[in-house]
Image (tube, coloured by chain):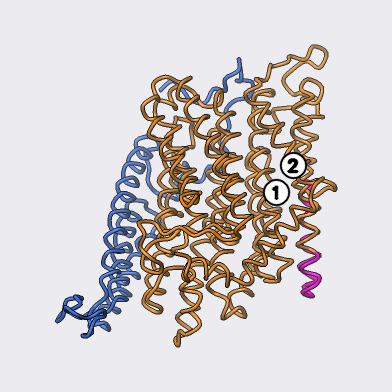
Amino acid sequence: MKILPVLPILLPMATAVLSVLFRVDERRAHGVALGGAVLHLVAGILLLATVLEQEVLALWVGNWPAPFGICLVADYLSAVMVVITAVIHTTMIVYARLDIDPQQVRTGFYPFMQILTAAVCGAFLTGDLFNLYVWFEVILMASFGLLVMGHRPGRLTGAVKYVTVNLISTIFFITAIGLIYGLTGTLNMADLHTKVAGVENTALLTAAAMLLMIAFGIKAALFPLFFWLPAAYHTLPVSVSAFFAGMLSKVGVYALIRMFTLVFTTNTGVTHTTLLVVAALTMLFGVVGAASQMEMRRILSFHIISQVGYMVLGLALFTPLALAGAIVYLVHHIIVKANLFLVSGLVRQAGGAFNLKHVGGLYKTHGLLAVGFIIPAFALAGFPPLSGFWAKLLIIRASLESQQYTLAVLAAAVGLLTVFSMTKIWSEAFWKQSPTEDPKTPVKHPLSAWMLTPVLALGLITILLGLFMEPVIRFAVFAAGQLMDPQPYITAVLGGGR
Amino acid sequence: METLLAYLVGFMFAAAIYLMLSGVLVKFVFGFVLIGNAVNLLIFTAGRLTHIHPPLISQGRTTLTTPASNALPQALILTAIVIGFAMVTFLLVLLYRTYSRTGTLDADDAPFLEEIVENAPGTASGSKPNESDPS
C-alpha cells in the first residue's frame, strides 16, 4: 500500500467535510466523527505495522521526486506519534458526546477537530520543512476556531494571548525557512541533512537553527516562552483542552526532535547545550508554577511545561539512550496528560467546580473517578510500575551516563514536586470534606459512561504500557537509532526508492 | 540591490517589533502585517535577485546556462502571503470581538491580567456542564 502514509491525513479531512454536512444534527455529527476517528485509528495502526516491517516509508506526493516535490515520510517516531494522535482523538471524541453542547456542534466543533487532527498527523509525517510550516498554520487555524467557540468568560482574552504568541512563533519559523533556503537551496529535510554539512557560513546557519528553536520552543512551551499555555488551556471545553494538552505542545517537541537530530547536528556545542539549559529551566519553572495554583486545569497546564522539559532534556543529551527516553516520555505523557484533563472535567461534573477550594469528598461518592484519577496522576509523578517511572528512569540514567549529575538530580527533584501537586489535587478534591455539601447526606451526581469510559480506557493503556515496558523500550531504542543514524531515512527519501 | 533589501528588511523588522511590543493590540496587528511582509522580502532576497534572464531552460539542454533568480522562493512567498492574510483576518475579528466584550485592547488592562476565571461553585446540574452563558 503505497498510499498508506497519506491516509492519516486524508481520512480526518474527509470526515471533516462529512461532519460539516451533519452539524445541525448533534447525534449524527457525533456518529460521523466517531466513525472517522476509529477509521483513522485503524489507518494509524496499519501504518505503524507497515513501518515496523519496512523501517521507513516514503511517499512522493504528485510523483515529483524529492528533493523537488513534497514527500511524506513515516519512520518509527512518526508512525508511533500518528497512532497516539489517533488514540487521543478517538477517546476525546467519545468524551465530547456530552461535553460539547449543541450550539458548539453547530458552530462547527467536529469539522475543526478533524482538521486539527489531520494537520497534527501531517506535521508528524511530512518530510519537507515548508510543508511542516503549512501544517503548523493549519493546526493554528483549527485551534483558533476551537479556542473561541462558546461564550465562557475569559475565553477571548485567553485566546488573544494564545493567538498572538503563536503568530509570532510562525514568523520566527518562516524567517528561519528563508535563511535556510538561502544557505542550502533546499527545504527537504533529508536533503538538508547532506547539504547542511557543506554550508560555509556556519554562523548564519546556527542563527537559523536558533530561530527554529525559538519557533518550536514557543509551540512546545519551553522556558521562557511558556506563558501563553497556562493562560489559554483552562478556558477551553474539557475534551478540547485534553487534545490540546496531549498533542499540540508535543508537535513542537516532535519538530524539535526531528530538526535537531536530522538537520542541525553540526554545531551541537551551541544548539544542544542551549537546549540542555532550557530543558532544565523548563522542568523547574513548570513544576514550581504548578505549586501555587488552585485551579485544577491550571495545575495540569503547568505540569505540561515541566514534563516537556524532560523530553527536551532527552533530546539535548543527544545519546541513543536519552533519545529513546524522550520517545518513551512522549508516548507516556500524551496519554497521561490527556487523561488528566478528561478527569478534571469529571471532577467538575461531580464536584461542581474546577477550583480545588470548592470541591471535595469525591472519594466517598465517586470511587471509579478516584481510580481514574490516581492512575494517570501517579504515572505522571513517576511511580513504579506505571509508564512514567520507566520514562523518567531512562532520562535520568541517560543524564548520569553523560555525566550531567546536576540534571539527573534536578529531574528526580522535579518528579518529587510533581508528586506534591498530584497529592494536592488528591487530598483537596477526593479526601477533603466537601465544602458545600453536608457530609452526612452526600449528593451523588451521576457520571455518564460516555465520559467515564475514555478516562478508564486511557488509564488501562497507562497500566499496560507500564507493565509491558520492555517491547516499548526496545521500540524506542530502535526509533532513537533511526534518529541518531538517519542514513536509511535519507536513502528512503532521496535514493532509488522509486 | 541585495544589501539595500537587507537593510530594508532589517528596518521593517525593527519597526514591527517596536509596534508589537507597545502593548496595544491594534498596534500589534500593524506590527504583524509589517513583520510578515519583512519576512516575505527576506525569502525573496534569499532566492537571489536577477532580473535579466528568466529561469527558463533553453531547448536541447537539461540545466540552466545563465544565472537566474530562483523561482521557488517566490512560490513560497505566495503561500506565505495567503496564509498571512487569513491570519490577519482572523486576528482582526478576534480583536473586534474581544473589544466588544471587554471594552479594551490594552494588554495592560485588567481583563487581560485576570489569571483565574472561575464560575461560582455548585453550578453543575444534570449530566451536561454549563459551558455557555445565555448570550
User: Which shade of the palette goes to chain B?
Assistant: blue
Query: In the rendered image of this protein, does residue A404 appear above or below residue B127?
Result: below
Q: Is residue A358 left or right of residue B55?
A: right
Residue sitting at x 72%, y 48%: A291
Residue A21, compared with residue B76, is above or below; it is above
User: What is the residue that sits farthest to the left in this orientation?
Assistant: B52
Q: Amino acid at mark 2?
A: Thr
Decide if residue A14 is in sight here. yes
Q: Secondary structure at mark 1?
A: helix
- Check whether the beta carbons of the residues at disc 2 and disc 1 lie within 8 A of each other: yes
| Nearer to us in this view, A4 or B34 | A4
Relative horizontal placement of residue A380, taking residue A4 as reference (left or right): right
Give me the residue at 74% from left, 42% from top: A462
Hey, which residue is sitting farthest bottom in the picture?
Answer: A200
Identify the disc placed on residue A462. 2
The residue labelled by disc 1 is: A332
Q: Are marks 2 and 1 on the same chain?
A: yes
In the image, taking residue A361 as reference, residue A36 lies left or right, namely left
Q: Label 2 marks which chain's residue?
A: A
| Horizontal and vertical percent position of residue A225 | 55, 59
Residue B77, located in which quarter of the rendered image? bottom left
Tally the marks.
2
> Badge 1 sits on which subunit?
A
Q: Residue A68: x, y in percent? A: 36, 68
Instruction: Name the residue type under label 1.
Output: His
Task: Let me know if residue A450 is in the magenta part.
Answer: no
Rendered-image quadrant of the C terminus of chain A: bottom left
Of all chains in the rendering, the one displayed in orange is A
Q: Is residue A416 magenta?
A: yes
CA–CA distance between discs 2 and 1? 7 Å
Stretch of the chain drawn in magenta: A397-420
Question: Mainly helix, strand or loop, the magenta region?
Answer: helix
